[in-house]
Image (cartoon, rainbow, N blue to C red):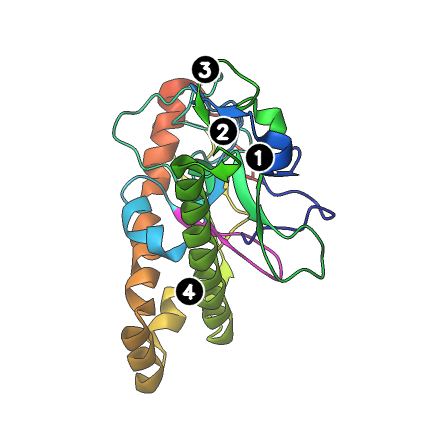
Amino acid sequence: MASAPQEMSLPLFYNQLEPLSSQIHGDFNVRPMESAPHLAHTHAVPVTVEEFPMVQRFMPIVFSLGDDPVPLALMGLNEGVNTYFDDAGNLIENNFYLPAYARRYPFMLARLRPDADELSLCFDPSAGAIGKFDEGQPLFANGEPTELVKNVLEFNRQFEEAAQRTTQFMAELKELDLLTDGETTIQPDGAAQPFVYRGFLMVNEQKLQELRGDQLRKMVQSGMLPLVYAHLYSLSMMRDIFARQMQQGKVPQPQLVS
């Protein structure tokens, strides 16, 4: 979830990264993105722990596989399926919470060199939102960042801080050995076979119940326990997302989700 150096593989959504510069981009404008084609076929988006209470109302929160799992909000249960955006990237649901990871695009904070300590505000030029346009809002005025850029920088700074707290949250889950392989089985009426979805991690409720009293107190005091339950409560949204896929005709033959 944390921003990656430009020399490494770019994060989800980003095709290129270019540092924002008053010398190079002094006469550039940023125009609103009327749609989000980068989201059209994205079924999972990273989220921070601060977002759990809001995200759980709309999407399941699961954790990615691997040595360094991250929280993910599922917009669809199958690869390439997004039930909240159409194929052109238009939002089709008025009542919806879009995770901050997606809202920050096409900007992000990144290290320009692997050994650099500071993060620089960068943008994805392939997004088509920033350039020498007649319309839009200026990025700089008299060589200085405009209020818009200052707000973008602050939003991205807050996101990076939230990402760090999320990394700590995940480290504590791993330390307590609470993560386990997840599986959801959905049997629609009239279907010959159930739909089985795997390929994610979730909190093991049995292990959570078996934690020692001092461990639970620490989770309560740190604010971690409510976040864990927000994740567990959100898993009921799996069936809601599946129902959305059914309604939109986006349910493939029964298979294992990747």
Among the two numbered marks 1 and 2 on one chain, the one whose residue lies closer to the N terminus: 1
Mark 3: which amino acid?
Glu
Q: Secondary structure at mark 4?
A: loop
Q: Nearer the viewer, residue 123 or 214?
A: 123
Q: Secondary structure at mark 2?
A: loop
State the extent of the magenta-drawn residues as a range: 61-71
- The answer to if 68 sits in the magenta stretch is yes
The image quarter in which residue 68 lies: bottom right
Q: Are marks 2 and 4 in contact (CB under 8 Å)?
A: no
Q: How far apart are the alpha carbons under marks 4 and 3?
A: 52 Å
Q: Secondary structure at mark 3?
A: loop
Indicate the quadrant containing the C terminus: top left, top right, bottom left or bottom right: top right
The image quarter in which residue 149 lies: top left
Q: Position of residue 103 (x, y in %)?
A: 42, 37
- The residue under label 2 is 39
Q: Is residue 38 above or below residue 199?
A: above
Q: Are marks 4 and 3 in contact (CB under 8 Å)?
A: no
